Image (cartoon, rainbow, N blue to C red):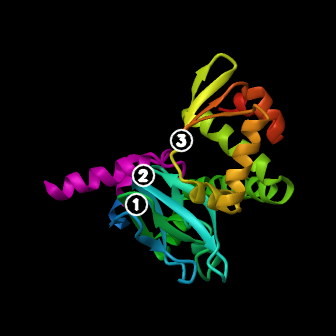
């Protein structure tokens, strides 16, 4: 009975992903039989950019942060993934090492599907390969947008875009504006934006002086006019793309 419950949990996790959600029950049971469950504590590394890519990972619970680190230890966050996300889809087919380091930001549960098993699934089931192609296209777009943000926008614009993203995800609309909470520290925000804590703090101060935001303590923040902040950030039609 315990084994059946475990298999059911795996299938539920697989169904939450764009890669596996459209597959038949029989195929999901087959994939679940390949998957090994791994539990991670906060701060624990799932895989490192210095390791050979050996598996594809499905986030079943928790939150996983994907980062790259420079030689001097500076960190750039590539993405933060929650339940339903798929990690390491590209390197297990491209060969070589993982492209990034994945770290649990909270207690997490991850399904690990070995590289050989994934290769076999793609050879035998065209629908898996097609879903994988769509997933990789989505990832390509994400990284293109990240490169654009880092290369073409100054830090104040990056901070403004970050605030717009939070507003879109969990902000509370108030008229033309929005109230939101900053759950990350200044160093954590800086890591996501490819900057430093002091620079992010100065950018928030400048946005406040420009009356684009109103800080209420360290975490609570009011955006009086979302359209004005969107214009400053150079982000077009973000509210229509929910």
Q: Earlier in the sequence, mark 2 or mark 3?
A: 2
Residue 32 position within the rendered picture, expressed as x and y whole percent measured from the top left: 35, 59
Provide the residue designation for mark 3: 219
* SS label for mark 1: helix
Q: Earlier in the sequence, mark 1 or mark 3?
A: 1
Q: Marks 1 and 3, how far apart in space?
A: 42 Å
> Residue at horizontal 62%, vertical 80%?
95
> Residue at horizontal 83%, vertical 60%?
151
Q: Earlier in the sequence, mark 1 or mark 2?
A: 2
Q: Residue furthest top?
A: 175
Q: Marks 1 and 2, how far apart in space?
A: 9 Å
Locate residue 39: give its quadrant. Answer: bottom left
Q: Would residue 215 be found to the left or right of residue 229 on screen?
A: left
Q: Name the residue nearer the viewer: 205 or 101.
A: 205
Residue 94 position within the rendered picture, expressed as x and y whole percent measured from the top left: 65, 76
CB-based contact (under 8 Å), mark 1 and mark 2: yes
Residue 178 position within the rendered picture, expressed as x and y whole percent measured from the top left: 62, 26
Q: Would residue 95 be found to the left or right of residue 156 on screen?
A: left
Provide the residue designation for mark 1: 31
Provide the residue designation for mark 2: 14
Q: Quick one: label 3, few (<14), some, or many (20+) residues within 10 Å? A: few
Chief SS of the magenta region: helix
Residue range highlighted in magenta: 1-30
Residue 10 position within the rendered picture, expressed as x and y whole percent measured from the top left: 33, 54
Q: Which residue lies furthest to the right in this view?
A: 152
Q: Name the residue nearer the viewer: 176 or 40.
A: 176
> Residue at horizontal 72%, vertical 57%?
199
Q: Does any portion of residue 142 appear in the rendered image? A: no
* SS label for mark 3: loop
Q: Quick one: label 2, few (<14), some, or many (20+) residues within 10 Å? A: many
Q: Would residue 63 be found to the left or right of residue 210 on screen?
A: left
* Front tag of 1 and 3: 3
């Amino acid at each position: 009975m315990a084994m059946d419950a475990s298999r059911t949990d795996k299938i539920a996790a697989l169904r939450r992903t764009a890669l596996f959600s459209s597959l038949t029950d029989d195929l999901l049971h087959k994939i679940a039989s390949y998957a090994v469950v791994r539990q991670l504590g906060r701060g624990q590394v799932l895989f490192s950019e210095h390791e050979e890519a050996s598996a594809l990972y499905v986030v079943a619970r928790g939150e996983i942060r994907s980062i790259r680190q420079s030689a001097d230890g500076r960190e750039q966050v590539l993405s933060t993934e929650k339940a339903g996300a798929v990690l390491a889809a590209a390197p297990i087919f491209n060969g070589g090492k993982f492209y990034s380091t994945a770290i649990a930001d909270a207690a997490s549960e991850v399904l690990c599907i070995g590289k050989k098993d994934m290769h076999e699934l793609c050879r035998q089931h065209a629908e898996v390969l097609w879903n994988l192609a769509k997933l990789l296209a989505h990832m390509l777009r994400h990284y293109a947008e990240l490169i654009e943000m880092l290369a073409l926008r100054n830090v104040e614009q990056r901070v403004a875009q970050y605030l717009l993203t939070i507003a879109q995800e969990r902000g509370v609309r108030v008229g033309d504006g929005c109230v939101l909470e900053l759950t990350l520290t200044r160093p954590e925000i800086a890591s996501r934006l490819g900057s430093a804590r002091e620079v992010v703090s100065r950018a928030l101060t400048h946005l406040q002086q420009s009356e684009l935001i109103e800080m209420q303590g360290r975490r609570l923040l009011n955006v009086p006019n979302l359209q004005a902040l969107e214009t400053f950030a150079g982000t077009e039609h973000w509210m229509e793309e929910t």
